[in-house]
Image: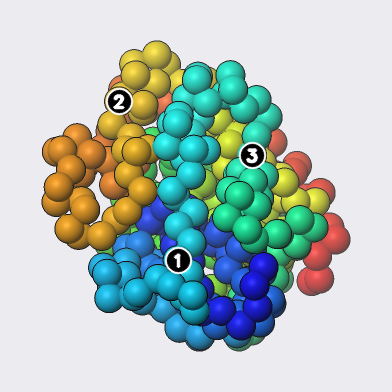
Amino acid sequence: MERFKRVYLAPISNGLGDLICSLPVLQSLIASGRETYLVRRSTAQQGFDERIDGLAGSIDENELEQISAGASVQVINLRDHPLQTDHIWGSPEFLQKYPQLYIDEIIRRIAADKGVDIDGLSCRPLLSKKVQALTGKIAFIPGSRGLQKCWPASHWLTLAQLLRERRGFECRVIGEPDQSPIVKELLAAGLIWHPTPTIGEALDALSSVRAVVGVDTGAMHMAVQQLVPTVALFRYNALFARQKAYVRSLLAPTCDRACLALEFASVGNKIVSYKTSDIQAKSEAEKTSEFYWETWKCQMPPAQHCMTGISAEAVYENLLQLSSTAAT
């Protein structure tokens, strides 16, 4: 890589988890000595500037039109790559062509093709502050923009009971009840909430706990970035599972065919830019797929939801294995 060159990095997509998973590329650019800027692809990616050590700053993607690429400036768009556009991630076509390919390796390959080497680069935690009230606690991250990714409230409550009665562990719910029905349901059932009104406060909270249990959402990936022992709960597809020694990824059974048909019907994998001008020029189907997890719902009755197939006992056992090595 050329040194001392200003570079703007746009993450793999527009969600919080997409930014977190893209951090190794951003941190590698910073470590190279280049003046590095984050390109925010949505409001979900705001609030990180002061937490990324060495970052020169950040801009919204719409501001890229004001940046003149040239000898001293480079724009790296991690979404503009065949691994992104040729096939929908997790689709049968993608899995046939790339079996056993996980998110960290996908990003490594994309970065390499963009001239950024992240081989052997471990997670470098973001800057955080200790929250003493959370020391020794287990954090639950139950909410997601995609309700189909959520674990049933009854399972969370059973897990909390197992942790309390068998190990004496206290749990705290991380999430916003006014934005997540399942967070609201768990608080109504008596679980204790730790408010995190800003992304920085969420980062501090997750950096302070003993361990985390979370569904496939940005906050869960943030815990992984902070090197916190994490049990991650996924639907049937393990593509977003993080291959780390301190992470256990549990998969639900394969979804019903009705759900699978909806899942891959409106994913805008051809979208490489989230600038307003570009989105406005796209079809209605492409526009609605910007946050496609919100565009479809599980087609099965609650009792038959695929995520019910992950048992509280299995989560408890995996969490116990991880948390036994964490500081009390």
In this figure, which residue is indicated by the disc labeled 2? 265
Label 2: state its secondary structure: loop
How far apart are the alpha carbons under marks 2 and 1?
A: 31 Å
Residue found at the far front of this picture:
71
**Residue occupying image coordinates x 35% and y 74%:** 68
Labels 3 and 1 touching (C-beta < 8 A): no
Q: Residues within 10 Å of mark 2 (few under 14, many from 20)?
A: some
Q: Residues within 10 Å of mark 3 (few under 14, many from 20)?
A: some
Residue 196 appears in the figure:
no
Q: Position of residue 236 (x, y in %)?
A: 54, 28
Quadrant position of residue 298: top left
- Look at the picture and state if 12 lies above or below 62: above
> Residue 102 bears which disc, if any?
3
How far apart are the alpha carbons under marks 3 and 2?
A: 22 Å
How far apart are the alpha carbons under marks 3 and 1?
A: 25 Å
**Residue occupying image coordinates x 49% and y 54%:** 78
> Residue 75 bears which disc, if any?
1
Disc on the earlier residue, 2 or 1: 1
Disc on the earlier residue, 3 or 1: 1
